Amino acid sequence: AALNAGVGRGDMFLKGDLGDDLSIVDLNVRSTVHLAKLVLRDMANRGEGKVLLTSSVASMMPGSYQAVYNASKSFVQSFAKALQDELRDTPITVTALLPGPTDTNFFTRAKMDNTPVNKMPKDDPADVARQGFDALMRRDKQVVAASLTSKVMGTVSRVLPDPVKAAG
């Protein structure tokens, strides 16, 4: 099963609409938990299964002007790690997919057309999906997909202090 929910909004947290923030939490967090509960129970009853949870390289960054989105993807990342630990002695695999900026309508829907991240090159969604699927089939715990730029973002995010990442 692939749980690939993701919606965001690019705005200063204090200026943003509370309803928009809660919609991000509802889709990115609540629906992921809800669907994971359903599919994992079914997989446990069958005695096998694989789940791909889409987080983001943004989950490793403070996310100025995307505070709720980045926090929601941090939740998904933490959730994936917790499920991996809980299911470690079972034939059920949970893989976290951490894509970088991807060429979808995400940035337009998030009202982020004029942001630096929207102006940078983006990954091909087919490449991201293929790398996520391949990692899931290999039973990897995590994959940062797809381009070298995204992989570097993921690696650098692990070592840079949060204030430096937030200023980026």
Image (tube, grey):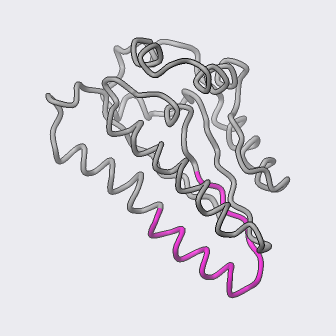
- Give the x, y percent position of residue 108: 37, 29
Q: Which secondary structure class fits the magenta region best?
A: helix
Residue 4 left/right relative to 10? right
**Residue at position x 52%, y 74% from top?**
37
Name the residue furthest right. Answer: 138
In this view, the residue in front, 2 or 63, is 63
Residue 11 left/right relative to 77? left
**Residue at position x 33%, y 57% from top?**
26
- Give the x, y percent position of residue 158: 61, 27
Q: Image height check: is 152 above or below 125? A: above
Q: Quadrant of residue 34?
A: bottom left
Q: Which of the image's four quarters has the N terminus?
A: bottom right
What is the total number of numbered labels drawn onto the structure image? 0
Decide whether residue 41 is among the magenta residues: yes
Residue 156 left/right relative to 117? right
Q: Which residues are magenta?
A: 33-53
Q: Image height check: is 57 above or below 141? A: above
Q: Which of the image's four quarters has the C terminus?
A: top left
Q: Image height check: is 17 above or below 165? A: below
Q: Image height check: is 119 above or below 54? A: above
- Give the x, y percent position of residue 19: 17, 48
**Residue at position x 33%, y 51% from top?**
25
**Residue at position x 54%, y 27% from top?**
101
In this view, the residue in front, 109 or 79, is 79
Decide whether residue 56 is among the magenta residues: no
Q: Quadrant of residue 14?
A: top left
Q: Quadrant of residue 3?
A: bottom right
- Give the x, y percent position of residue 163: 41, 17
